[in-house]
Image (cartoon, rainbow, N blue to C red):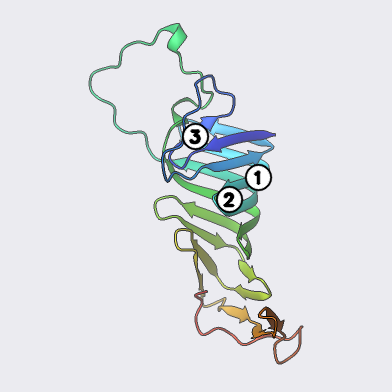
Amino acid sequence: MAFFFLPALGLAAAGAAEPKKKPQEGEVPLHITAARLEADQQERLITFTGQVKAVYGDAILYADQLQVFYQPAPATATTPPPAKSPESKDTSPLGDLAGGKIDRIVAKGSVRFVQEDKVATGQEAIYYKDREEVVLLGNPQLWQKENNVKGEKISFYLNNKRVLVESSPQQRVEAHLYQTKQSAAGTKEILPSPKGPKGRGPKAKDGTI
């Protein structure tokens, strides 16, 4: 099993010789476990395959395959850097990808996204680092407790925990919603829809949750 620790702005291989650095204030780490890892320094891409699990803050992403795309390397100065001695040779198997900035992450195959009481499924998910957004595609569906909604595309905004469900000419937004009532003890109880537990609840007027 491959295990890697990716800070929000970089990546460090587990077991690297260099000492661990404390994460910067406000920095959220990304932990990924998988059966296999492949790094392509030329394409600036790291691919995880085999029962992939990625944990980022309070969000967890499961998939068959996960690809981490890095931003292009910054332009180097015209003056060539001093030659490295054999002792100072880079020990990271990922080369200059270690410490690079993440551009986006693409998950494919049996995708499941979990955040607090929300669970979403689909065939593909794309995480955009610059705007902290996860986009779920491929017959996406979202469950929150007993409520269910589906559409053409579901977007999760991690900073404010907002969810947007969008439609298309082929797939309109459809929601199954259950009412709640306040019990005497002060707890909320879920009421079935008017058509019964297996019936369809009212459709939401828009796709925002």
At x 51%, y 48%, the residue is: 105
User: Residue type at mark 3?
Assistant: Leu
At x 56%, y 76%, the residue is: 170
At x 57%, y 73%, the residue is: 151
User: Residue type at mark 2?
Assistant: Ala
At x 65%, y 50%, the residue is: 63
Query: Of marks 2 and 1, which one's residue comes earlier in the chain?
Result: 1
* Element type where label 2 sits in the image: strand
Q: Is residue 141 above or below residue 194?
A: above
User: Residue type at mark 1?
Assistant: Val
Judged by depth in the image, the label closer to the viewer, 2 or 3, is 3
Return the x and y of residue 74 as percentages of the image width and height. Answer: 32, 33
Tell me whether circle 2 and circle 3 mark residues in contact (CB < 8 Å). Answer: no
- Image-based side of 109 in relation to 151, left or right: right
Tell me whether circle 2 and circle 1 mark residues in contact (CB < 8 Å). Answer: yes
Query: The N terminus is located in which quarter?
Result: top right
Judged by depth in the image, the label closer to the viewer, 2 or 1, is 1
* Element type where label 1 sits in the image: strand
- Residues packed near mark 1 inside 10 Å, few (<14), some (14 to 19) or many (20 plus): many
Query: Of marks 1 and 3, which one's residue comes earlier in the chain?
Result: 3
Q: Which mark is residue 52?
A: 1
Q: For mark 2, what is the residue?
A: 107
Return the x and y of residue 9 as percentages of the image width and height. Answer: 43, 40
Q: For mark 3, what is the residue?
A: 11
Return the x and y of residue 172 as percentages of the image width and height. Answer: 55, 79
Q: Is residue 159 above or below residue 209?
A: above
Q: Nearer the viewer, residue 46 or 11?
A: 11
